Amino acid sequence: MLSIKMQRSSIFFVLILITSSLRMIFCGTKIDGDFDDTYWYPLDIKVWTWWINGNVEISSKNVEISAKQSEFIKAINFRNNKKIEFLPIKVYKKLPNLNVFQAFNCAVQEVKYENFQNLAELQLVSLASNEISNIPKDTFKDLSNLKHLELRMNNIQTIHELSFQNHINLKFLNIGSNEISYISPTTFENLKELRNISMSDNTLQSLGDEHFKNNKKLERIWLQNNKIHILSPTMFDHLKNLVVANFTGNSCIDRLFEVNEDEFCALKVLGLKEIIKKNCES
Ligand SMILES: *[C@@H]1O[C@H](CO)[C@@H](O)[C@H](O)[C@H]1NC(C)=O
Ligand SMILES: *[C@@H]1O[C@H](CO)[C@@H](O)[C@H](O)[C@H]1NC(C)=O
């Protein structure tokens, strides 16, 4: 009898939490949203998720969530909302246990440290299809449990070489469909668990041995539709798990090195044989 009473009161407590979370507001603006128990691919987890409604607007920087703390909310989802121009700051004060942060297809212009500060439980961050042009070095600094980072389809031109330094658990990184022409050789050096990386549809010009030196578990590298013309012939030698490296849609790779073409153009490296030439300029 006692235990039944306790169960009832804890259900009641959860209901109070849900109702109070529904009244969360950003800077005086009422935030509406729906809650449900969403399954998150590819993390393979089902967590209590707050789906922010499309009429919510965030058009100024440094907006904080004003609500009571909700430790049971594990995911926040601003999706398909072109009125979200900035992400809220210091989210950890209200939602300290987030595993998932998704702002897919909004109009986010900038990201900074305060947006993801102290959210050390985050495993999935998706900011695909926004208007971000720069990833400052401390943006994702606190996210040491991050597994999946999605930054495709923005206007990113520069990624600071220390931006990914703390992601020792990252398995998937997508920086495809941006405007990146240069990646520092040390940018990925701490990503020892990385399996898949997409850098397709950028304007990258060169890659060397240093770029994937420490990513020994890499399985897939998508590099199609770039402007790569300088490539080290030995850059894949240590990648024993490589399944595919896709170079389709790069116009010419300058053969400034002596290379055993059959070895270099093994089947798993797609589209490379066609574009290796001597002296691309002529
Ligand atoms: C890597 O990509 C393959 C093919 O798309 C996919 O099946 C696999 O789940 C991905 N792994 C990770 C860790 O993202
Ligand atoms: C390689 O890239 C081309 C061009 O984007 C694409 O059509 C093809 O499906 C890709 N193949 C793999 C295995 O990634």
Image (tube, rainbow, N blue to C red):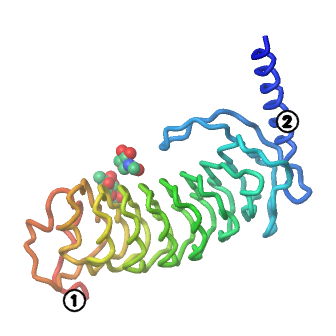
What mark, if any, has residue 282 been given in the picture? Answer: 1
* Closer to the camera in the image, 56 or 281: 56
Q: Quadrant of the C terminus?
A: bottom left
Q: Amino acid at mark 2?
A: Thr
* Left or right, residue 82 beside residue 221: right
**Is residue 79 in view from this perspective?**
no
Q: Position of residue 184 (x, y in %)?
A: 41, 80
* Closer to the camera in the image, 246 or 150: 150
**Which residue lies most toward the bottom here?**
282
Q: Amino acid at mark 1?
A: Ser
* Left or right, residue 188 beside residue 154: left
Name the quadrant where ligand 2 sits. Answer: bottom left
Q: Label 2 belongs to which residue?
A: 19
Neighbor class of circle 2 (other Cα within 10 Å; few <14, some 14-19, many 20+) is few
Q: Position of residue 234 (x, y in %)?
A: 18, 74
**Which residue lies most toward the right here?**
28
Secondary structure under badge 1? Answer: loop
* Left or right, residue 100 beside residue 61: left
Q: Nearer the viewer, mark 2 or mark 1?
A: 2
**Which residue lies most toward the top here?**
1
Q: Position of residue 104 (x, y in %)?
A: 62, 53
* Closer to the camera in the image, 43 or 80: 43
Q: Is residue 46 above or below residue 242?
A: above
What mark, if any, has residue 186 been given in the picture? Answer: none
Q: CA distance from mark 2 to mark 1?
A: 69 Å
Q: Position of residue 209 (x, y in %)?
A: 26, 77
Q: Residue at image x 49%, y 76%?
A: 162
Neighbor class of circle 1 (other Cα within 10 Å; few <14, some 14-19, many 20+) is few
